[in-house]
Amino acid sequence: MSVETWVEMTHTVPMRFEACALNDNATLHFGQSSEYVLTLGRDNLRQLVDLATLAIAELDSAVARGGTDDDPARASGAQRATLPG
């Protein structure tokens, strides 16, 4: 797999999905006119959900610790997690 794309969604954007049982995948559409589209098989979709859940937990943890600084230059640094796959 090779992907050369950078998408940043720091503000709320419209999102929708289409599920295809025949191909066992889902297509996620981001933006008013589907400016960004991502098609994932079931296993990769599950990994994405798991990774997003970890990211949300980390953000919630940072808020609980009082680390809500929105300026990346002052923030303590990005937290990263990798799921096996």
Image (tube, grey):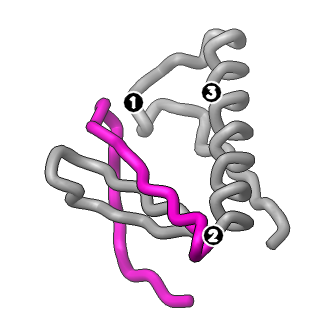
Residue 64 falls left or right of residue 75: right
Instruction: Indicate which disc, 3 or 1, sits on the residue closer to the N terminus.
Output: 3
Q: Nearer the viewer, residue 39 or 59?
A: 39
Task: Report the number of numbered marks.
Answer: 3
Spot occupied by residue 28 in the image (x, y as percentages of width and height): 42, 56
Q: Nearer the viewer, mark 2 or mark 3?
A: 2
Q: Check disc 3: other Cα within 10 Å, few if <14, some if 14-19, many if 20+.
A: some
Residue 80 vertical placement versus 82 (above, below): above
- Amino acid type at image mark 1: Asp
Residue 7 falls left or right of residue 23: left
Disc 2 to disc 3, how far (Cα)? 31 Å
Q: Quadrant of residue 46?
A: bottom right
Q: Which residue is denoted by mark 3 in the rendering?
A: 59
Q: Which residue is denoted by mark 2 in the rendering?
A: 24
Residue 42 on the magenta span: no
Spot occupied by residue 18 in the image (x, y as percentages of width and height): 43, 55
Instruction: Indicate which disc, 2 or 3, sits on the residue closer to the N terminus.
Output: 2
Mark 3 element type: helix
Q: Check disc 1: other Cα within 10 Å, few if <14, some if 14-19, many if 20+.
A: few
Residue furthest to the left: 33
The span picked out in magenta is 1-25
Q: Which residue is denoted by mark 1 in the rendering?
A: 71
Name the chief secondary structure element in magenta.
loop
- Amino acid type at image mark 2: Asp
Residue 12 on the magenta span: yes
Q: Nearer the viewer, residue 39 or 55?
A: 39
Position of the N terminus, as image quadrant, is bottom right
Spot occupied by residue 40 in the image (x, y as percentages of width and height): 56, 68
Q: Residue at x 34, y 42 (%)?
A: 15
Q: Residue at x 69, y 49 (%)?
A: 51
Residue 68 falls left or right of residue 29: right
Q: Nearer the viewer, mark 2 or mark 1?
A: 2
